[in-house]
């Protein structure tokens, strides 16, 4: 899926005053110290970039988030040796750089926080309730799992370890994982499957021993996921704002800690599209701080963060 181009059309400078900036915490002095010029135009540019990001990714970026966006953009400007957001917008329009730079912009707009065994009760539910319930699907059934918004891979490999272990103790059980994100940088890290050893501390020792390899010499502080688990995962770039998700039918979707960044209307649209690829009886896992309450979607709650499509 290719992201639509952030354009600058449709947003004018009219009606934007510095009053709005002060109340949102973005004061002129804050802008000066971080290297941008003090003219109100930079705030207009920040808002214009924020609006473009929201249009393309669905991520909410109200004024209260502009300081954060500004900090991330500033790092990119430094990398490019640029002094102003005006130059940066020019780069986004320049045919020689536009496509690659838009990808960079979307990458920097995403928040990729994740962990191994994050919200661990979901993985217990998966093996104790969901997989036994789904296993009535017959001998030739392959359990298809989508890690939707997989970030740098910790959630994907947690799933792979848990499913791999389930397969070990349940002969005949087979699975495959599709992992997607819109951030190319996050996907690159996920595909590399290599992490600093301290990040895998939440992984239970038995799984660590079975599925993670310790680096040697120069890579002594690193671990890598074993090849047989890596082979179970297919990565792809997918924007949830796409009109459909070409992933085939799925039994389980992990869509955790992503929709929290979206407007309610966008959440509903994304969930509806996910329901279309979820098989009857399939499960959707969302983050503990997220909720589908009040959204009219064809899922029944098993718990507040685990939902099931009618069989
Ligand atoms: C906070 S991380 C969550 C990672 C993981 N699911 C977890 O719970 O640990 C959110 C991820 O959603 C991705 N994301 C945000 N907006 C997206 C969009 N419109 N399409 C696809 N992925 C998106 C981000 O790139 C980021 O990696």
Image (cartoon, rainbow, N blue to C red):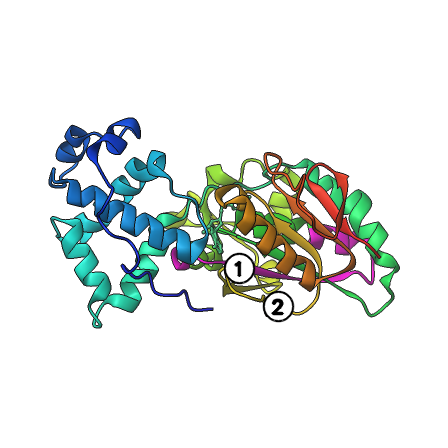
Task: Please state which of residues 242 and 140 is positioned toward the viewer in this rendering.
Answer: 242
Extent of the magenta region: 163-185
Front in this rendered view, residue 264 or 238: 264
Q: Residues within 10 Å of mark 2 (few under 14, many from 20)?
A: few
Residue 175 lies in what quarter of the image? bottom right
Disc ID at residue 31:
none
Q: Which mark is residue 247?
A: 2
Q: Name the residue under label 1.
A: 180
Q: From what the image shows, is residue 233 above or below residue 115?
A: below
In the rendered image, residue 162, in percent from the top left (x then y), is placed at 68, 48
Q: Position of residue 118 (x, y in %)?
A: 58, 38
Say if disc 1 is inside 8 Å of ligand 1. yes
Q: CB under 8 Å between callouts 2 and 1?
A: yes
- Magenta-span inclusion, residue 165: yes
Q: 131 left or right of 212?
A: right
Residue at (28%, 28%) from the top-left corner? 25
Q: Which residue appears at 84% of the width and 57% of the height?
A: 311
Q: Is mark 1 on a helix, strand or loop?
A: strand
Task: Please tell me which of labels 2 and 1 falls first in the chain.
Answer: 1
Q: Where is residue 242 in the image (x, y as percent from the top left)?
A: 51, 64
How many residues crowd mark 1 within 10 Å: few (<14), some (14–19), many (20+)? many
Is 289 within the magenta?
A: no
Towards the viewer: 241 or 254: 241
């Amino acid at each position: 899926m290719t992201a639509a181009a952030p354009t600058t059309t449709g947003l004018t400078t009219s009606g934007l005053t510095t009053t709005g900036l002060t109340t949102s915490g973005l004061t002129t002095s804050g802008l000066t110290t971080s290297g941008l010029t003090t003219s109100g135009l930079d705030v207009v540019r920040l808002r214009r970039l924020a609006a473009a990001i929201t249009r393309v990714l669905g991520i909410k970026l109200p004024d209260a988030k502009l300081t954060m966006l500004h900090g991330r953009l500033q790092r990119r400007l430094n990398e490019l040796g640029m002094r102003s957001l005006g130059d940066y917008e020019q780069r986004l329009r320049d045919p020689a750089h536009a496509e690659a730079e838009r990808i960079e912009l979307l990458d920097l707009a995403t928040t990729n926080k994740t962990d191994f065994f994050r919200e661990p009760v979901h993985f217990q539910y998966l093996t104790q309730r969901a997989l036994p319930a789904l296993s009535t699907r017959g001998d030739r059934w392959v359990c298809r799992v989508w890690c939707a918004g997989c970030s740098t891979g910790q959630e994907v490999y947690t799933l792979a370890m848990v499913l791999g272990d389930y397969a070990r103790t349940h002969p005949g059980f087979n699975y495959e994982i599709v992992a997607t994100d819109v951030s190319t940088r996050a996907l690159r890290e996920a595909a590399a499957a290599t992490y600093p050893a301290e990040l895998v501390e939440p992984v239970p020792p038995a799984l660590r021993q079975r599925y993670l390899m310790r680096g040697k010499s120069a890579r002594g502080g690193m671990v890598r996921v074993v090849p047989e688990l890596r082979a179970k995962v297919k990565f792809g770039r997918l924007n949830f704002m796409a009109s459909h998700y070409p992933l085939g039918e799925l039994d389980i979707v992990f869509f955790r800690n992503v929709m929290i960044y979206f407007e309610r209307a966008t959440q509903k649209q994304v969930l509806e599209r996910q329901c279309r690829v979820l098989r009857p009886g399939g499960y959707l896992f969302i983050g503990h701080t997220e909720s589908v309450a009040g959204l009219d979607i064809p899922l029944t709650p098993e718990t507040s963060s685990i939902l099931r499509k009618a069989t």
